[in-house]
Image (cartoon, rainbow, N blue to C red):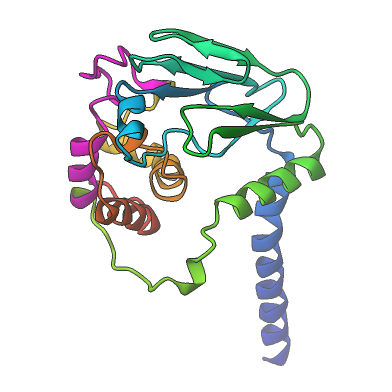
Amino acid sequence: MTEVRSRTGRMLRSLGVAAVLLPVVGAAMWPVTFESREEVFDIPKGTWARRMAGQKHEILPSEIRLMTDIHNVLLLKNSDDVPQIFGPTMLMPGQTLRLPFSRPSENYFACTAHASGQLLVIVEANPVWPWSRLGWRARRMWRAWPRDWFDRPRGRSVSYAEARAIVDRRCVECHAERPVSRAFPVAPQAVMLDTPQSMKKHAGRIKVRVVEERTMPIANLNGMTEEEREILGGWVDSGAPIP
């Protein structure tokens, strides 16, 4: 009987070690991939007018991260009705700027579309070795982790129906198989949220862009509320349930 308990204990310890090591090995061995080489941002119509009126809308994040070889192109589209400045370039209304990067670097640009007047583009080297992949994924998780997470009260479970209502109201105008927004004839970055399966597929992206970075909806033109952001974050934290 003692021997059986000893074997069971060793087996449980081995399973515990495997449960820890397998995700680490996977993170180290799995190549880093992105949906597209391009990181796309649109400066919506009326941006300059709202800023002149004293309204604060964050259209672009203060820091954009790219990666050599696989995600190394910044694409800016000016849908505003006045020119916008990005670095040495004056982006005229309707014009698109495609800016590729070939080397790891940190680049500060003057940017009239950002509230601070400048924007940092960090280009990281493509991590081709296992340890570098593991380190990159660990740093990415740390950056995405909300700084106030431990101080937050634990929220309730959020249903798909609650999240669906918000996505239909605030997101699918652009992020659908057939967008109705005149600014986007196709879904930006091929992110479509008009089915339960597609919502679940992009749940992590919803959490990052809507709740943490707050870069979506673009310039918050459709007025997404703080409560709606919290509900979408709660849906993701609840395991992104779908019917």
Q: How many marks?
A: 0
Q: Would you identify the image quadrant in which residue 184 lies? A: top left
- Residue drawn at x 25%, y 51% is 228
The foreground one among 132 and 145 is 145
168 in magenta: yes
Q: Is residue 61 above or below residue 91?
A: below
* Residue 217 shows in this picture: no
Where's residue 215, x and y in %?
42, 38
Left or right relative to 135: residue 190: left
- Residue drawn at x 61%, y 20% is 87
Q: Which residues are magenta?
A: 162-188
- Residue drawn at x 63%, y 15% is 88
Where's residue 13, x and y in %?
70, 74
Left or right relative to 163: residue 114: right
Left or right relative to 206: residue 143: right
Where's residue 126, x and y in %?
74, 29
Where's residue 194, x and y in %?
25, 30
* Residue 110 shows in this picture: yes
Q: Main secondary structure of the magenta part?
A: loop
114 in magenta: no
